[in-house]
Image (spheres, rainbow, N blue to C red):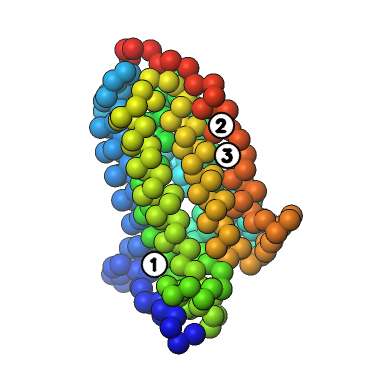
Amino acid sequence: MLSAILYPHLDPVLLQIGPFAIRWYALAYVIGLIAGWRYCVWLGSLPPMPLGRALFDDFLVWAVLGVILGGRLGYVIFYNAGEYLADPLKIFEVWHGGMSFHGGLVGVILAMILFARSRGLPFFALADVIACATPIGLFFGRLANYNNGELFGRVSDVPWAMIFDRGGPEPRHPSQLYEAALEGIVLFLVLLYFARFTPARGKLGLLSGIFLTGYGLCRFFVEFFREPDPQLGFLTFGTTMGQLLSLPMIAIGVIFILRAKPAPQSQ
């Protein structure tokens, strides 16, 4: 207890003018989306199938809707259905938190399917680029979780354990930082290596498969240190909801890797 690090009590509100408030959590989404968009513009301009900047400019709006609607509905369905069924209006209170990455992923995938069809574009030509940029948003999102003092880890005696306000008096793993490092930095670098220094961009679906498999493995591992959602607790065989949702991601990712097909040499 005496050696534990006290959580630094970061203010979740960056700026407040009267009733109007800018929160770090919302700012993380904005920064992640803008940085991801710029990265997509750069990566998508490279061969073997270059995509114009206008394509990603137009898709940004679709991505925003997919992330927000999918992330919110995913949290409602997967993590707290009972509470929201009892009071459906709470679904719209996004400023109180409650977003699911897996739900946001489904939302973005649906957005990509519809957008690609509307442009006559192969789905994976778009999806592979978006997959490479997704860890950027994950990194900033996990930092926002840390800033809010939420989604903390399990009780631990490691030297870097922290006492979070919402986690009681026991020191806990700062699992938000573990996720920021693995799902954000490590996964980004892995995808960057494959996209720039291997022929991976020449095979449609390969980068998407690497992302799904990589994220699923990272999330499954970190869940051993992250405190389960209190309304769910531990599930079958001591697993968590995050782990159960990651298993199909890993399986689908492996299928994408094995079934990747050569990309056209021109747009």
168 relative position to 59: left or right: right
Quarter location, residue 40? top left
Residue at horizontal 51 percent and vertical 27 percent from the top = 257
Residue type, numbered disc 3: Met
Q: Where is residue 155 shown, x and y percent of the image?
A: 56, 73
Front disc: 1 or 3: 3
Residue type, numbered disc 2: Val
What label sits on residue 254 in the rendered view?
Answer: 2
Precedes in sequence: disc 2 or disc 3:
3
Front disc: 2 or 3: 2
Query: Marks 2/3: CA distance?
Result: 9 Å
Task: Say if 265 sits above or below 72 in the image.
Answer: above
Front disc: 2 or 1: 2
Residue at horizontal 28 percent and vertical 38 percent from the top = 39
Q: Is mark 2 on a helix, strand or loop?
A: helix
Task: Say if 176 sits above or below 127 in the image.
Answer: below
- Mark 2, other Cα within 10 Å: few <14 / some 14–19 / many ≥20: many
Q: In which quarter of the image is the C terminus?
A: top left
Query: Marks 2/1: CA distance?
Result: 34 Å
Task: Say if 126 sits above or below 170 in the image.
Answer: above
**Nearest to the observer: residue 158 or residue 227:** 158
Q: Name the residue under label 3.
A: 249
- Mark 1, other Cα within 10 Å: few <14 / some 14–19 / many ≥20: some
Q: Mark 1 points at which residue?
A: 147
Quarter location, residue 51? top left
